[in-house]
Amino acid sequence: MSLELSDEQEPTDQTAGPLAYALLLFMGVAWGLAISLAKLAGNHGGHPVGMALWQVCTSGSMLLALSLVMRPRRRPGPGILRFSLVCGGFGVTFPAIALFWTAIYLPAGVVALAFASMPLFTYLLSVLFGVEEGERRRLLGVVVGLAAIALLVLPDEALPEPGLAPWVLLGVAASISMSFENFYAGGYRPPNSSSIQLSCGRQLGAVLYLTPIALLTGTTIPILEPWGVLQWAATGTGVTAGAAYTVLLHVIRTSGPVFASQTAYIITIAGVGWGMVLFGERHSAYIWITLGLTLAAIALVKPRQASER
């Protein structure tokens, strides 16, 4: 998830009204639900590659329709195609496969915590490559976030079963991959391109990667047979992710990226909450401490508003 603006004038959080807060809540709850839907699809026999392909086809179709409605005469140029392939690989293909794979083995709440580290690594990459300065408060957030990950994978009592730590690290690797996409998108966004167009392009770029992999491995989800929980749950992940991303673009445009970035808190809490509601998940004290540390890390890493600087 990258927070970008296509307008020349960046709005501030001061423009956020009740509707913006409602949309912020919707985004977080929807993305948190997508994690549990991914687990539900995996529990009913879906393969991570096939489920990832189904998800991006669903969300990509939604965004393509929206893109055609908003800008029906605009054709993608080479810059947009290159952007779509890079972001479709690092920001969608690998993270989508990792999401479905980790959801098979881990509680939905733990998956949410593993993926919540993306803002931390996005900022760390920006510092390492000289895009942003190393601010002490935000660097402390990175340290707190790394401590949360360590608390999740090192103690044997943290996870429900021994040997699950590698799956947590797969989720963290996916977060690093999405962080690279955010970093790339911030520096190589094609000129004269809309956020809707780029969002659609990254999904369709992932379709190009996932389709041959799914066909070669025979992991596609049957579409013509009667639909069951697998098909509906996989569709749900695409619909919720596509709807949430579309709302995100609107909130960025109207209330600013700093305000929109606060959805990270809600996604993390909602991911844990949906797992408890839908699967009856109960967590160890380590998980709850990790949740607290993760929320604290996100708060520290979040950039200040211009008026606060």
Image (cartoon, helix red, strand yellow):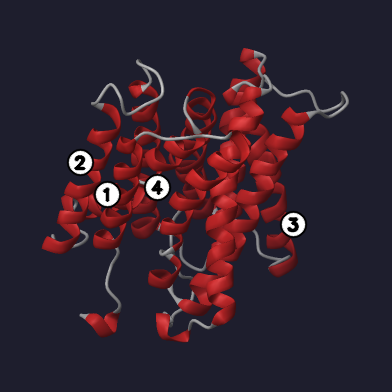
**How far apart are the two marked residues, 4 and 1, measured between alpha carbons?**
25 Å
Instruction: Say which label, 1 or 3, has the lower sequence index.
Output: 3
Q: Which residue is mark 1?
A: 293
Q: Residue at x 46, y 61 (%)?
A: 263
Disc 1 and disc 3: Cα gap in Å?
Answer: 40 Å
First in sequence: mark 3 vs mark 4: 3
Which dot, 2 or 4, sits closer to the camera? Answer: 2
Q: CA distance from mark 2 to mark 3?
A: 42 Å
Depth check, mark 1 against mark 3: the one in front is: 1
Query: Looking at the rendered structure, which numbered label has been put on residue 65?
Result: 3
Q: Which mark is residue 181?
A: 4
- Mark 2 or mark 4: name the one nearer the start of the chain: 2
For the residues bearing labels 2 and 1, Cβ distance under 8 angstroms:
yes
In the rendered structure, which disc, 2 or 1, sits on the residue that comes first in sequence? 2
Q: Position of residue 211 (x, y in %)?
A: 64, 28
Alpha-carbon span between mark 3 and mark 4: 24 Å
Tag 1, which secondary structure? Answer: helix
Q: Position of residue 96 (x, y in %)?
A: 53, 35
Q: Amino acid at mark 3?
A: Ala
Q: Position of residue 130 (x, y in %)?
A: 17, 57
Pointer 1: residues within 10 angstroms few (<14), some, or many (20+)? many
Tell me the amino acid under the disc marked 1: Leu
Q: Residue at x 35, y 22 (%)?
A: 166
Q: Is residue 224 left or right of residue 194?
A: right
**What residue is drawn where x is 69% and y is 48%?**
239
- 49 to 6, vertically: above or below: above
For the residues marked 2 and 1, what is the alpha-carbon distance in whole angstroms? Answer: 8 Å
